[in-house]
Amino acid sequence: MEIERYLVEKKEEIRGFEVKKRLVKFPVTKFGTAVIGPRRSGKSFSLFSLIKDKKIKDEDYIFVNYEDDEIKTLERTKKIRVVDAHIELYRKPPRYIFLDEIHALERWQSFVYSLIEKKKYYVFITGSSSKLLSKEIATQLRGRIISVPVFPFSFKEYLSLKEAVPSFPLSSSAISNLKGFLREYLLSTGFPPVIIDKMNPKVFFKDYVNLVIFRDIVERFRVKNIYALKFLINRIISSFSAKFSVNKVFNELKARNIKVGKAMLYDYADHLDDVMFSFFLKKFYFSEKKSALSVPKAYLCDLGLANYLIGTKFSEDIGRAMENIVSIELKKKELGGEIDLFYWESHNCEVDFVVKEGLRIKQLIQVTYASSIDEIEKRELRALLKASKELNCKNLLCITWDYEGIESLKSRGLERKIRFVPLWKWLLSPSD
């Protein structure tokens, strides 16, 4: 297929899609915009939504998905002549250029850089790789691109799809209704194909894992030990919201007489983090080297991976599910370059999240399944107070299931105020 025909047919395809509006804010800038997130989380559709919201005309934009079969078979020289092809079609240059799954294009950095440098276009790129489009982008594109994360539907988006977005102030029955939706959300998924297209969730997640394994990891990183990779994935899923030791997985495989190098397993874990299947939170130290070498906590890009592949029980795993949902909202901010995220631990005391902004600790967050102050374990509050003293941070937040208030607590001569906020309220205003 010639590139010109592809560009025209792609726009016809986009016009035919019914698009659900996402709560994603795209900057309008001549700097590039990198839309990053897990595979099938809705990155492409968020751009379709942008095209429709802004009513961008066909002659004003280019949309190319570099994983489309029609494009993959073309030579690189044809893949990158999209601007010339557009001008031939419409006799004018485009204003917007959307390059989907950019990592599938060889030497994409130089091509994107040349487009941004012209300062003629609004350039958007997408990819299912945090390193490709976030950690390494500053050097590859010399600070000329802004990252915008797109994950599966958030709780607020979930409520919008259910036509249940609340109007404040809320009555007691409205709050109970919200908690019912939150319980439903924690036990299901935010992935669009399951929520919107009503795809069987168990089938979707089995296919999703295979897609991540074979397309995102095996093809991209030339991984050969599929058994070890699948074993690692299963262990990560079952260990969500908890400390995760690659060394322990290595010993388990060794006990099963499965030959795999420890360094290779660490690489596999990095690959899963890279494609945003899961992500790993390092322990906070004032020393970056110590932090990098710490045992991380593992989180999933979506709770559906646990709910439908291993099966979770609300009564047993609600605290872990709550923590994972909070981690996703904070991870979006980290990917957007707003914060750095860690956990903290010292002498059997642990704080779930340390939010670092620049050189200072901005906030300490504990997540607990509690409906009253009496249900919160004292060790969790003592951990907040101890971390507050050690890290010199007075902004202490405890996210609960149902309890709200401000408490002044003392421990070993130290007094601090701790703010308690229900999860549903925090999720509806995550900037809090």
Image (cartoon, grey):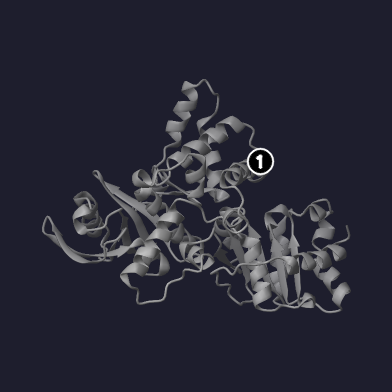
Nearer to us in this view, 168 or 21: 168
Evaluate whether residue 41 shows in this view: yes
Q: SS at mark 1? A: helix
Coordinates of residue 95 in the picture (x, y in percent): 73, 77
The residue singled out by tag 1 in the image is: 214
Coordinates of residue 155 in the picture (x, y in percent): 46, 62
Pick the quarter of the image with the C terminus. bottom left
Coordinates of residue 55 in the picture (x, y in percent): 70, 79
Q: Amino acid at mark 1?
A: Phe
Nearer to us in this view, 64 or 318: 318
Q: Specify the farthest residue to the left.
A: 413
Q: Is 291 on the left or on the right of 262, as rendered?
A: left
Nearer to us in this view, 302 or 243: 302
Q: Specify the farthest residue to the front.
A: 173
Q: Is 417 on the left or on the right of 116, as rendered?
A: left
Q: Which residue sits at x=27%, y=58%?
A: 391
Coordinates of residue 194 in the picture (x, y in percent): 58, 53
Pick the quarter of the image with the N terminus. bottom right
How many numbered badges does the structure rendering display? 1
- Residue 75 against residue 215 in the figure, above or below: below
Q: Residue 94 is drawn in which quadrant?
A: bottom right
Q: Which residue sits at x=39%, y=59%?
A: 180
**Label 1: how many residues lie within 10 Å, few (<14), some (14-19) or many (20+)?**
some
Evaluate whether residue 283 shows in this view: no
